[in-house]
Image (cartoon, grey):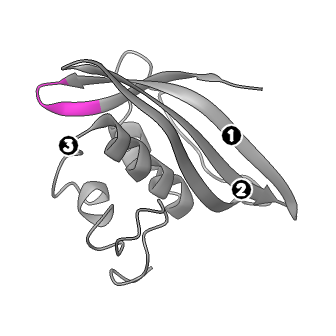
Amino acid sequence: MKPTDSCPCGSAESFGQCCAPLLSGQQPAPTAAVLMRSRYTAFVRRDAAYLLASWHASTRPATLVLDDTPAPKWIGLQIRVQEALDADHATVEFVARYRVGGRAQRLHETSRFVRENGLWFYVDGDIHD
């Protein structure tokens, strides 16, 4: 993906102006919703290192292997609700759409985020049916 390509997160910005600086570690996510968008982009790019780094230590798995066969083709992210619970806690409800083997799927989740030392982290989430 070139820096001038549209960002997978659906922000309408270029990848280079949107999620690339976060995935490369050049800048932190300013909000939980921006972190959510960057994590979606990391799934699209199969960037397990970023996903692990942006996952809170209390719930982070020891490893993350993104080698599903066939690999999911991520096709869109919709942020439905973003809510700041206080200065350091937030939730983001989203729907991520993808295809596996030509079949459309979706992940609908309300994720919890925490900010520590100025950095946002994904904690966990509740999957909606």
**Extreme residue toward the left, this view:** 117
In the image, residue 77 sits, relative to residue 18, either above or below, namely above
Among numbered discs 1 and 3, the one appearing first in the sequence: 3
Residue in view at x 61 percent, y 59 percent: 76
Quadrant where the C terminus sits is top right
Residue 35: mark in rendering: none
Looking at the figure, which quarter contains the N terminus?
bottom left
Q: Magenta residues, as a range?
A: 116-120
Give the residue number, with chain letter if any, for mark 1.
107
Secondary-structure class at tag 3: loop
Q: Is residue 1 magenta?
A: no
**Residue positioned 48% across, 63% down in the render:** 10
Residue 45: give x, y in percent of width and height. Answer: 51, 63
Provide the residue designation for mark 2. 98
Tags 2 and 1 touching, CB below 8 Å: yes
Q: Quick one: label 2 or label 1, which is nearer the N terminus?
A: 2
Rendering coords of residue 71 (x, y %)? 72, 60
Q: Determine whether the residue tagged by mark 1 lies in a helix, strand or loop.
A: strand
Vertical order, 105 against 16 (above or below):
above
Residue type at mark 2: give it.
Answer: Tyr
Q: Position of residue 111 (x, y in %)?
A: 49, 27
Residue 30 numbered tag = 3
Q: Position of residue 46 (x, y in %)?
A: 53, 58
In this rendering, would 9 be left or right of 103?
A: left
| Amino acid type, label 1 | Leu
Occupied quadrant, residue 6: bottom left
Give, as a three-letter code, the residue at label 3.
Pro
Q: Earlier in the sequence, mark 2 or mark 3?
A: 3
